[in-house]
Amino acid sequence: MARYVASRLLSLLPILFGVSVVTFLLMRLVPGDPVIAMLGLEADQAAISAMRLRLALDDPLPLQYLHWISRVLTGDFGRSVQGGREVLPLLLGALGPTALLATAALIISLLIAIPAGIVAATRRNSAADYGASLIALFGLSMPSFWLGILLILSLSIAYPIFPASGYVSPLVDPLAHLRHLTLPALTLGAALAAATMRMTRATMLEILRSDFVRTARAKGLGPRAVVWGHALANARIPIVTLLGIQLGQLLGGVVITETVFSWPGIGKLTVDAIFARDYPVVQGAVLLTATLFVTINLLTDLLYTLLDPRIRLA
């Protein structure tokens, strides 16, 4: 196990290096001048030259990259072009709201998808199966921004039950936090539930035709024990794999949902930084997102050994 973890951690280094290089180069290809965006169009040439010198924007690209990556390796992601704040605390501050939103969305997804997938698999070709599959197809096809706007129109404007936008820290007011969290979590959870339900149904259908399931039924076990105790226990690996990918994507920031609901997460921070040509924030956000994604994939692989002792990581 230790050898496997060490090899996987070493394999992450070239991936993160490639992500950093691509992000750095793409940001330099974006039209516009970050100094002009920071100082304004009315800034004089002396101020512009001084700022470009301070940010080392006149150096060759390889030298700019080496300066930036050497600071990143020491935990210094630089300072934001807007406001001059340090990038790392800015990213960590936005990561908290994104993590809360991602966790709530996954919980909603599991509460909907697992029971629906099991019902669809155990009642194959029935009205329940067709209904669940139709709803899942609708959830996969529906744009998240459209569902978010519908929820705002129905549950915030027509019936003012939940706030339409904004964020309240759970440490300040837990109840207000839950009210602000509900609509964006439902928006994300619906799309996640659709994919998870289809995966659950497909995996359960395959396992319910297995020999050990027929043996369990032949021994006299009831349908609930067979489905929940045996079939679902063996269907966890594909579902956990999908959930790991979804969690990595969510922690990377769900740009559209965070923008629609003005949720101050990684996604919204990154979009705002792109529009402002804020190189340090965009580069730091992409690098942090990539690190989280590959780390979650590693943890998912390690979780396999707990869910299925037959799996051994070499």
Image: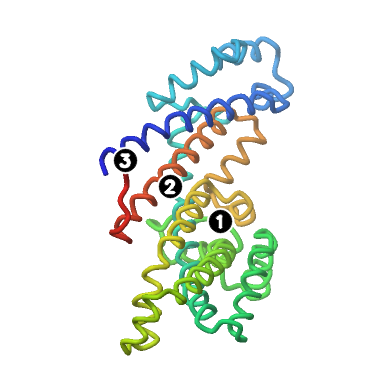
Q: Which residue is mark 1?
A: 166
Q: Mark 1 is on which residue type?
A: Gly
Q: Earlier in the sequence, mark 2 or mark 3?
A: 3
* Residue 161 image-quadrant placement: bottom right
Q: Which residue is mark 2?
A: 297
Task: Locate residue 10 relative to residue 133 in the image: left or right.
Answer: left
How far across and down, in percent of the image, does residue 63 sit?
Answer: 54, 12
- Is residue 1 in sight in this rendering? yes
Residue at x 52% of width, y 27% of height: 84
Residue at x 62% of width, y 24% of height: 25
Q: Is residue 244 placed above or below 3 in the rendered structure?
A: below
How far across and down, in percent of the image, does residue 233 sit?
Answer: 36, 70
* Residue 198 image-quadrant placement: bottom right
Q: Which residue is mark 3?
A: 4
Residue in the foreground of this view, choosing between 250 and 273: 250
Task: Locate residue 134 relative to residue 292 in the image: left or right.
Answer: right
Residue in the foreground of this view, choosing between 44 and 111: 111
C-alpha gap between disc 3 and disc 1: 43 Å
How far across and down, in percent of the image, does residue 85 sit?
Answer: 49, 30
Report helix, strand or loop for mark 1.
Answer: loop
Report helix, strand or loop for mark 3.
Answer: helix
C-alpha gap between disc 2 and disc 3: 13 Å
For discs 2 and 1, the disc positioned in front in the rendered view: 2
